[in-house]
Amino acid sequence: RQRDEWEKRRKMKVKRERGWTGHSWGGISLGPPDPGPNGETYEDFDSRIIEVKSVFNMTAKEGRKRSISCLVAVGNGNGAAGFALGKAADRNTALRKAKNRAIHYLYYIERYNDHT
């Protein structure tokens, strides 16, 4: 029958791609931020999702208006790190906004014995 042909198991992700748990978005790598307007590239940086959540704004005409809020951290593994919040109507746009905004808010974190 058709029911027997359906895929019963979810496809497993590689451990590196799945984040902290298999279900949540936290810990998933987004890769380096997009190149800047002046041609700067950020290949040595990596960005990780910290939190993805749905937020609702109550309006008089539209009722509950949903948007996605994403917190993303960016770092190069050598002491430079930044984080930012991105909000948009859909998840991919919010993640892209947060990833590209985080590179503008970099902090230097002192390292002890070449690790944090």
Image (tube, helix red, strand yellow):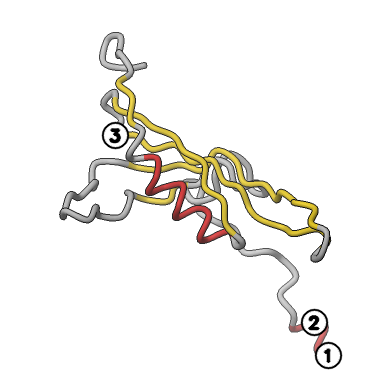
Lower position in the chain sequence, tag 3 or tag 2: 2
Amino acid type, callout 2: Asp
Measured as percent of width and height from the top left, residue 116 is found at 37, 16
Report the residue marked by disc 1. Answer: 1
Q: Is residue 22 above or below residue 89?
A: above
Q: Residues within 10 Å of mark 3 (few under 14, many from 20)?
A: some
> In the structure shown, which secondary structural element does the residue marked by tag 3 occupy?
loop
The residue drawn where x is 25% and y is 54% is: 35
Q: Position of 6 compared to 95: left or right?
A: right
> In the structure shown, which secondary structural element does the residue marked by tag 1 occupy?
loop
Please tell me which residue lies in front, 22 or 102.
Answer: 102
Q: Is residue 83 above or below residue 79?
A: below
Please tell me which residue lies in front, 30 or 72.
Answer: 72
Q: Which mark is residue 4?
A: 2
Q: Are marks 3 and 2 in contact (CB under 8 Å)?
A: no
Which image quadrant for residue 11?
Answer: bottom right
Amino acid type, callout 3: Asn
* Circle 3 or circle 2, nearest the eye: 3
Measured as percent of width and height from the top left, residue 13 is found at 55, 56
* Circle 1 or circle 3, nearest the eye: 3
Amino acid type, callout 1: Arg
Measured as percent of width and height from the top left, residue 89 is found at 61, 61
Lower position in the chain sequence, tag 1 or tag 3: 1
The residue drawn where x is 31% and y is 55% is: 34
The residue drawn where x is 50% and y is 46% is: 28
> In the structure shown, which secondary structural element does the residue marked by tag 2 occupy?
helix
The residue drawn where x is 52% and y is 41% is: 85
Q: Residues within 10 Å of mark 2 (few under 14, many from 20)?
A: few
Q: Are marks 1 and 3 in contact (CB under 8 Å)?
A: no
Report the residue marked by disc 3. Answer: 76
